[in-house]
Image (cartoon, rainbow, N blue to C red):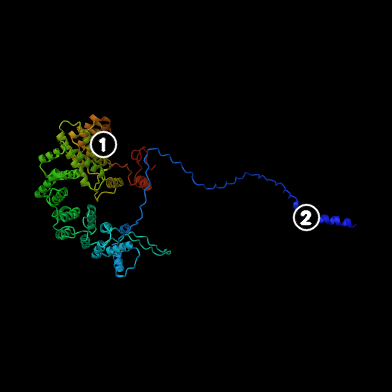
């Protein structure tokens, strides 16, 4: 009995332990339900972004030069390098706010700084902004290292009038409905007076270079309208190393004044130029005397300018200055007798003469200034070009084979101006106030103004005045000659010289019949449109309506029945019917 009770109890006690050791039962297989309608497949997941594959670089062939990457500027290490770097990094502010801030900062006690280079550069900036030039000169001369004085002065005259870089000021948000404040339209300009410039000139270091003198000239322009008469008097007495009685000082004074000595102001710089055979003196004297003659074209002034220019051409050793003198001679020989002018031009194409260089310079000026606003200079270039070609033809005589290429290059320079005028010149006709508004005419007038302002063509009369002559055209290749004759005929048409244009087209027909036929058809079409009574516009219907249609009932009552011949239409029936 006891055994019968103990065995079931022992089995019930071991049952949990046996259950833990068994594997879990498998879940029943899910039943897949296929929908009756077709559904859109799910969008696949986006792929993981990976770095782009690098393109293999081509191998550098052996023997090919490898360009090293630009080396970074080394940081200044020595005290001299640190001082020079600090001086070159100074940014000036000569605006009214900058001047007043610097004066206020100089009245206060300066804060001590550990680095002497930064302290010297900061005082350099404040003295320049405040305009305390005497103290600034003493400060520059007291700089400890060799070359520091020249470094500081060069940076002063180069960067003093640069506008300061301003950062945009943060503007608070504007509430709705409030007026928007206007934005400033201009920035304050740096200030410098002529007295300031004289004070800066007084402490210039010894031996200023040509670049320093040029920078001083730009600084003098920053004054606004400098009084050269007053400045020349001060230079005659001597300002630092400029002017006075020494030859070097007078040379520096002449170099300083010469860029600003235009026309009647040339006499102020001319008094500092010696009558010597030095290249700089010969060139400057020829330039200033030519400017004096341009301001007052009298025979004595012309004679003095011509003699100085001829002496420059015959004596100067620098080829660039000689070519400048010859180009200046183009302006001067316009007032010489024709035989003298022709002889002077012919000399340029003799053995060893710079004639070909002249053609190169003038034609490059023509191409560079195409569509420029200086129309007088462009016309002067064409005049000089024709004058050079005339001298070349006179010197060459009948042997033109070796001069064909230079003559073709010269003709190309005239062609680009002529074709620009042919394509874009539109004569602007002033319309009378009594004329009725015409939309077609107004459109043509606006088109003419737009093309003339955008492409800036020369007047046809200027091109015809300096056009290639018969001898010049005969020396050109056949293709270039035909193109030049076509441009000449089109320019004559633009200038309304109809009969001459027809003669030119007739001559062109012997050389290129196809081109002449095309130009003749274009010319006749334009001629017919210009003489069309409708003015080139499409015919328009009359604006007043027909009485018999508009007032049908009244016309029928007031007038007898219209006959078959008295109709408004063309079908022979009355429009009333």
Horizontally, residue 509 falls left or right of residue 306, namely right
Q: Secondary structure at mark 2?
A: helix
- For the question of whether residue 161 can be seen, the reply is no
Which residue is painted at 29% across and 70% down in the image? 107
Horizontal and vertical percent position of residue 193: 22, 62
- For the question of whether residue 393 can be seen, the reply is yes
Could you say which is closer to the camera, residue 116 or residue 348? Answer: 116
Horizontal and vertical percent position of residue 285: 14, 50
Q: Secondary structure at mark 1?
A: helix
Looking at this view, name the residue that lies furthest to the right. 1
Q: Nearer the viewer, mark 2 or mark 1?
A: 2
Which quadrant holds the C terminus?
Answer: top left
Q: Is residue 532 above or below residue 399?
A: below
Horizontal and vertical percent position of residue 415: 24, 38
Which quadrant holds the N terminus?
Answer: bottom right
Name the residue that disc number 2 marks. 16
Q: Is residue 269 above or below residue 429?
A: below
Horizontally, residue 554 falls left or right of residue 18, namely left
Looking at this view, name the residue that lies furthest to the bottom. 108
Could you say which is closer to the camera, residue 60 or residue 57? Answer: 60
Which residue is painted at 44% across and 41% down in the image? 57
Q: Which mark is residue 523?
A: 1
The first of marks 2 and 1 along the sequence is 2
Q: Are marks 2 and 1 in contact (CB under 8 Å)?
A: no
Q: Is residue 569 above or below residue 233?
A: above
Could you say which is closer to the camera, residue 63 or residue 211? Answer: 63
Rendered image quadrant of residue 519: top left
């Amino acid at each position: 009995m006891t055994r019968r009770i103990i065995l079931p109890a022992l089995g019930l006690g071991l049952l949990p332990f046996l259950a833990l050791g068994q594997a879990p039962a498998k879940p029943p297989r899910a039943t897949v339900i296929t929908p009756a309608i077709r559904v859109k497949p799910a969008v696949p997941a986006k792929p993981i972004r990976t770095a782009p594959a690098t393109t293999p670089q081509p191998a550098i062939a052996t023997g090919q030069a490898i360009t090293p990457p630009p080396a970074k500027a080394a940081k200044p290490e020595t005290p001299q390098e640190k001082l020079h770097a600090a001086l070159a990094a100074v940014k000036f502010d000569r605006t009214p706010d900058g001047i007043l801030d610097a004066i206020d900062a100089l009245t206060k006690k300066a804060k001590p700084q550990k680095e002497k280079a930064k302290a010297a550069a900061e005082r350099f900036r404040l003295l320049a902004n405040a305009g305390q030039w005497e103290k600034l000169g003493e400060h520059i001369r007291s700089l400890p290292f060799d070359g520091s004085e020249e470094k500081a002065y060069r940076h002063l005259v180069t960067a003093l009038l640069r506008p300061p870089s301003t950062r945009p000021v943060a503007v608070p948000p504007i509430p709705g409905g409030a007026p928007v404040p206007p934005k400033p339209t201009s920035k304050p300009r740096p200030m410098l007076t002529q007295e300031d410039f004289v004070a800066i000139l007084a402490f210039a270091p010894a031996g200023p270079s040509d670049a320093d003198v040029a920078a001083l000239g730009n600084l003098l322009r920053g004054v606004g309208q400098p009084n050269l008469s007053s400045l020349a008097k001060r230079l005659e007495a001597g300002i630092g190393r400029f002017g006075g009685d020494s030859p070097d000082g007078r040379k520096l004074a002449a170099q300083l004044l010469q860029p600003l000595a235009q026309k009647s102001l040339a006499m102020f710089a001319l008094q500092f130029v010696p009558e010597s055979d030095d290249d700089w003196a010969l060139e400057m004297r020829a330039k200033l005397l030519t400017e004096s003659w341009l301001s007052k074209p009298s025979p004595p002034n012309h004679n003095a300018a011509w003699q100085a220019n001829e002496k420059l051409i015959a004596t100067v050793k620098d080829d660039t200055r000689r070519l400048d003198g010859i180009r200046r001679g183009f302006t001067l020989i316009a007032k010489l007798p024709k035989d003298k002018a022709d002889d002077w031009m012919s000399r340029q194409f003799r053995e060893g003469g710079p004639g070909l260089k002249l053609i190169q310079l003038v034609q490059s000026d023509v191409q560079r200034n195409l569509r420029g606003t200086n129309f007088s200079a462009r016309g002067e270039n064409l005049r000089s070009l024709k004058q050079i070609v005339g001298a070349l033809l006179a010197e060459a005589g009948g042997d033109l084979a070796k001069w064909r290429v230079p003559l073709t290059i010269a003709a190309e320079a005239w062609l680009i101006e002529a074709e620009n005028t042919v394509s874009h010149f539109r004569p602007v006709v002033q319309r009378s106030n009594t004329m009725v508004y015409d939309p077609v005419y107004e459109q043509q007038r606006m088109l003419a103004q737009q093309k003339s302002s955008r492409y800036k063509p020369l007047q046809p009369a200027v091109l015809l005045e300096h056009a290639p002559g018969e001898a010049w055209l005969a020396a050109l290749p056949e293709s270039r000659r035909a193109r030049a004759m076509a441009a000449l005929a089109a320019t004559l048409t633009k200038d309304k010289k109809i009969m001459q244009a027809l003669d030119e087209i007739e001559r062109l027909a012997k050389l290129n019949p196809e081109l002449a036929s095309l130009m003749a058809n274009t010319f006749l079409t334009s001629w017919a449109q210009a003489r069309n009574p409708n003015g080139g516009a499409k015919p328009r219907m009359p604006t007043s309506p027909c009485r018999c249609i508009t007032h049908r009932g009244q016309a029928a009552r007031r007038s007898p029945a219209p006959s078959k011949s008295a109709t408004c239409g063309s079908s022979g029936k009355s429009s009333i019917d």
